[in-house]
Image (tube, grey):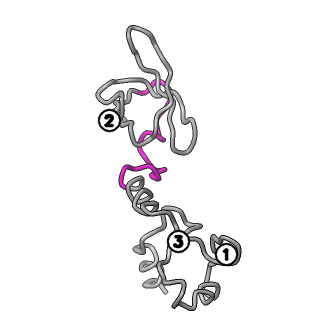
Amino acid sequence: MAQARAASRDRPTSVIPELFFVSFDIEKAHWRSIFSTIGVVSLICSGEMPTRVPEGAVDSIRDAEMAGFFDYTHAVTQLKPGDPVRMARGPFAGLIGQFQSMASRDRVRVLLEILGRQTTTVLVLSEVEAL
């Protein structure tokens, strides 16, 4: 029993647990058998036929994952208002600001000094690093 628990901890987790992508030839595959897969509730369809994911969509999701977009354990989420942060990427790269709050699961409110004025801006979580 302990081995089974350890093995499940090492298993990769899904970035978007509700979704998974499959590739098949709709003309040749018995695609309805997908419904017998444990955990499958539905398919994204157009009418009664599965819909093709737009070209590049899966790559875009992977790129977002690599950039930390889905990392909700990010160190910035542990900060308190007033803590210093550095803009690591994006248009404000290199600037130092103050963490204000989480704006959503994947965005943060940061106080920056821009052109001599204190300005609050909302940035993507992956663009900000804790100092």
The amino acid at mark 3 is: Phe
- Specify the label residue 59 is tagged with: none
Q: Label 2: few (<14), some or many (≥20) within 10 Å?
A: some
Q: Residue at x 33, y 36 (%)?
A: 89
The numbered disc on residue 20 is 3
Q: Which badge, 2 or 3, is on the more N-terminal residue? A: 3
| Crowd band around label 1 with a 10 angstrom C-alpha radius: few (<14), some (14–19), many (20+) | few
Who's the residue at 61% across and 90% down the image?
Answer: 33
Q: Quadrant of residue 104?
A: top right
Assess disc 3: are there few (<14), some (14-19) or many (≥20) residues with their C-alpha within 10 Å of its C-alpha. few
Residue nearest the viewer, comparing 46 with 63: 46
Quadrant containing the C terminus in the rendered view: top left
Q: Nearer the viewer, residue 107 or 34?
A: 34
Task: Describe residue 19's horizontal placement relative to residue 98 as left or right.
Answer: right
What residue is pinned by disc 2?
Answer: 88
- Say which label, 2 or 1, has the lower sequence index: 1
Identify the residue under disc 1: 42
Residue range in magenta is: 66-83
For the residues labelled 1 and 3, the Cα–Cα distance comes to 11 Å
Residue type, mark 2 in image: Ala
Residue at the image point whose x is 44% and y is 9% from the top: 117
Q: Are marks 2 and 3 in contact (CB under 8 Å)?
A: no
Of labels 1 and 3, earlier in sequence is 3
Q: In what element is the residue under mark 3?
A: loop
Number of callouts in the render? 3
Mark 2 vs mark 1, CA separation in Å:
39 Å
In the structure shown, which secondary structural element does the residue marked by tag 1 occupy? loop
